[in-house]
Image (spheres, rainbow, N blue to C red):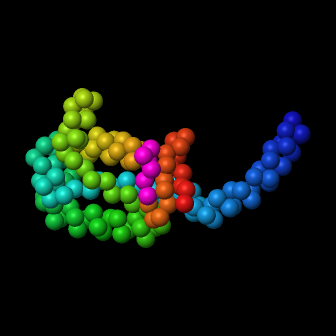
Amino acid sequence: MIILKIFTIVIQLLCLPVKILIDFIYGINSSSNIIAYSWYTPKEYKTLLQVAEEEFDNQLFPNHKAWLTSAKKTIKEFNSRGMVVVCLDIKINDLEKWLYINNLKNNQVNREQYLYRLFYQELDNGLRVSGKLLKAGSNRATAET
């Protein structure tokens, strides 16, 4: 048993320079610092207000201008914490089709599921963020220059 522990420690020490290099190039835990954010045009947001089935009345902003102000503030806050925010254009017609196919309501939780579905599709296709090409891989985003 002690031989196995020693072997594990030796392997970890041998791999440490590779981990340090990867963290230096791509940032520590770079894939966990990338988040998706729904982006709406004024027309799409107006449509969202008409079709959304929120459980609480105050979950959506009353108009696009209020939503946009909040979105910019939120994104700036995420960026200040070192996070990369990927804004994805939401087309309400496509969202509604996806919700219908999956027998889901148009609420915040299900819109987030749709957003992350779009996000991972974009990663599969290769998504450029801050000059790095991001690709999906084994449930984590990996970055290539």
Q: Residue at x 74, y 56 (%)?
A: 16
Q: Position of residue 138 (x, y in %)?
A: 55, 40
Nearer to us in this view, 113 or 121: 121
Q: Residue at x 38, y 57 (%)?
A: 86
Q: Residue at x 57, y 63 (%)?
A: 27
Q: Is residue 121 above or below residue 16?
A: above
Nearer to us in this view, 53 or 139: 139
Quarter of the image where one finds residue 100: top left
Quadrant location of the N terminus? top right
Nearer to us in this view, 67 or 1: 67
Residue 116 visible in the snapshot: no
Quarter of the image where one finds residue 85: bottom left
Quarter of the image where one finds residue 45: bottom left
Q: Position of residue 58 (x, y in %)?
A: 18, 53
Is residue 61 magenta-colored? no
Q: Which residues are magenta?
A: 123-128
Residue 126 visible in the snapshot: yes
Is residue 127 magenta-colored? yes
Give the residue furthest to the right: 3
Q: Residue at x 38, y 68 (%)?
A: 77
